[in-house]
Amino acid sequence: MNTPDPTHIITGSDPTITSPAPTPLAGHPAQFLVGAVSRHQFPPDDLPEVAFAGRSNVGKSSLLNRLLNRRNLARVSRTPGRTREINFFAIREQARFVDLPGYGYAAVGRDQRLVWDRVAESYFKERRCLRGVILLIDLRRGLLESDLELIAYLETRGIGFLPVATKIDKLNANPRRQSLVTLEKSLKEQTKLAMAPPLAVSSLDGTGIPTLWEQLERILAAA
């Protein structure tokens, strides 16, 4: 598995400002490939992939739909913790986005929580084409124990991740800025594998989406 070089990632920009230019993959057709419940159903390991991970109800499906400009390409579950599959999406036949099952939902039974561990771990262990993980974090809550557990696991495998703050439209400007500062400080204390400071995005109004696309392009291009 190739670990992204953090020097390929833009740092130091204001995460609340969108960038003006579209990127080569942005806006191109995306196709749902498969919802895999075991490694035997994974697509061939032949294209660069970025995996999207985060707690249940953090907004992964909504963000993917916004990124891919498709309203219902990624299914938004009304019941957090229900999704057990790893969903693969082809992007212009050049790359893939991988939607991992949400984790950390308290109302989900132990057996369902074990599904995430088993399926996600098989993905992380075997995908040589994985270039990095987009770790979605609810900005209102910051880093929670389940997020820290995933970060620790990524550390053991040397997998870089890009922290992306979601639900920013639920906060006013000043609390949003303060929460971003707090999140960045927490991440610096926990890990050295974050590819950049946390990027604030909104699936509702598109804040941060062009900048996130730039980051995705760079991660996918990393050898």
Image (cartoon, rainbow, N blue to C red):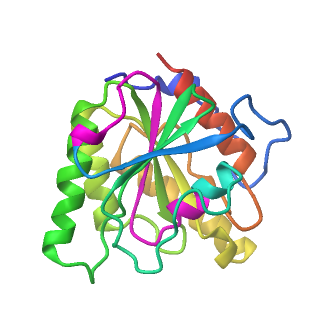
Of residues 13 and 27, the one drawn nearer to the viewer in this rendering: 27
Q: Does 71 sit above or below residue 197?
A: below
Decide whether residue 61 is among the magenta residues: yes
x, y (%) of residue 89?
A: 51, 43
Q: What stretch is highlighted in magenta?
A: 39-63
Q: Which residue is drawn at 56% across and 51% down?
A: 198
The number of numbered discs placed on residues in the rendered structure image is: 0
Quarter where residue 101 is shown: bottom left
Q: Is residue 41 magenta?
A: yes
**Which of the pair 10/97 is nearer the observer?**
97
Q: Position of residue 88 (x, y in %)?
A: 44, 44
> Residue 201, how many percent across, how many down?
66, 58
Residue at (75% x, 41% y) in the render: 27
Between residue 83 and residue 19, name the one nearer to us: 83
Q: Quadrant of the N terminus?
A: top left
Picture quadrant where residue 115 is located = bottom left
Q: Residue furthest bottom?
A: 107
- Residue 132's image quarter? top left
Outermost residue toward the top in this view: 223
Asked if residue 144 lies left or right of residue 137, the reply is left
